[in-house]
Image (cartoon, rainbow, N blue to C red):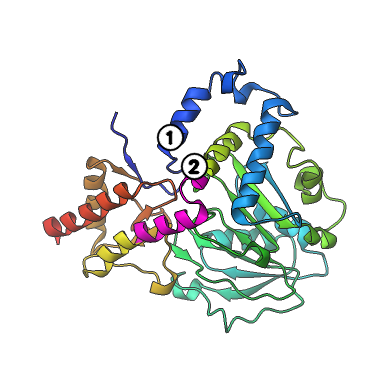
Amino acid sequence: MERKKNFYAGPSVLPLEVLKQVQEELVDYKGNGLSMIETSHRGGMFEEMYDETLAIFKRLIGAGDEHEFYFLGGGATLQFAMVPINFLPQDGKAGYINSGSWSEKALMDAKKLGNIEIVWDGKESNYTTLPNMEALVVDPGLSYLYLCSNETIGGIQYKEFPKTDSVPLIADMSSDIFSRPIDVNRFGMIFGGVQKNLGPAGAAFVLYRKELLEKQNPNLPSYLDYKAHGKNKGLVNTPPVFAIWVVNLVLKWIESHGGIEGMARRAEEKSRLIYDVIDSTPFYRSPVDTQHRSSMNVVFRLPSEELEELFIKESKKAGMLGLKGHRSVGGLRASLYNSLEPAAVEALAQFMREFETRHG
């Protein structure tokens, strides 16, 4: 079977060797006589795999004993509410940077739960740029400052993060986690769905500084309480076993391919292939401010919507899937997550040149 070139924004491409290992071990996990997805999560082979997964994640990102880390069921969207439920007191105020669709969704949920200040709003620029970090004013009285590090729909990504001093910085890193090194100590909390750079849909990762819980709201329902999850390693209820198992294998794949530094090199090389084509001709156009272009989600437009529809049709015939832009903005989008092989991106870049020759 010839596999398609997968540019979907999520759920997204996984390493072929990981898929083959899952296939091989699905029925009989490492000779234990049963599958990982049919064993108890209260010990045994699951607990061994889970503890290993937590350790690899923390090692890769550079987190220490001062950090709590675990997985929760569902995706990042639940955290849009859990963050203010836990960390926005009734007499407090949280700051949000509105840089696109996903930060706006988090902002709208937080507004229902407490007092919110929009520290910077990208709506006027149609979410095509980010704030000047040097000029960004952060009120020291904020309970936290929230941002989304990479907007998958708008194709915009932070290359540097705001200085918040004593204000905890909380970031949704669903779509660019482990695509580049970050200083984890600059953040009070990071979280994200795993279905873009880490595994299949069904789980979210949550990492925070333990000191953040000192200002946590009291008397929370157990599943919405980060402290309760921390005491139980995220095992308050049955975890998404399959998703976590695949994350374990993907993390090992990342380590075997140069770690985060290796992923960063891949991301830079792959995204440059597409941006070089876009910048070489007026036929393709990137709506995003050059300095804030995403290395994970490359969005671009053609001279007409008719040509965009033809591009999608012809690229699909060429074995390339997932290039249609999000329904809310249209256009085209190529998602270049860690697991996508450079050869697939080289093929897309060549297709773009040939498409322009035929239709430009």
Please give the name of the residue rendered at 73% of the width and 59% of the height, measured from the top-left corner: 84
Report if residue 260 lies within the magenta region. Answer: yes
- On the image, the x and y values in percent for residue 251 come to 55, 44
Q: Quadrant of residue 182?
A: bottom right
Q: Find the distance from the CA under tag 2 to the CA under tag 1.
A: 8 Å
Q: Secondary structure at mark 2?
A: helix
Q: In the figure, is residue 360 to the left or right of 76?
A: left
Please give the name of the residue rendered at 58% of the width and 84% of the height, measured from the top-left corner: 135
| 131 lies above or below 350 | below
Picture disc at residue 212: none
| 281 lies above or below 47 | below
Check disc 1 and give the amino acid type: Glu
| 44 lies above or below 257 | above
Please give the name of the residue rendered at 41% of the width and 36% of the height, measured from the top-left corner: 16
The residue indicated by pointer 1 is 17
Identify the magenta region. Answer: 253-271
Q: In the figure, is residue 26 to the left or right of 128?
A: right
Check disc 2 and give the amino acid type: Trp
Is residue 171 visible to us here?
Answer: yes
Q: In the figure, is residue 73 to the left or right of 142?
A: left
Answer with mark 2 or mark 1, whichever residue precedes in sequence: 1
- On the image, the x and y values in percent for residue 56 come to 62, 45
Of the 4 image quadrants, the one containing the C terminus is: bottom left
Report if residue 64 lies within the magenta region. Answer: no
How packed mark 1 is, by other alpha carbons closer than 10 Å (few <14, some 14-19, many 20 or more), is few
Report if the CB atoms under discs 2 and 1 are less than 8 Å apart.
yes
Q: Nearer the viewer, residue 311 or 132?
A: 132
Residue furthest top in the image: 33
Picture disc at residue 253: 2
Of the 4 image quadrants, the one containing the N terminus is: top left
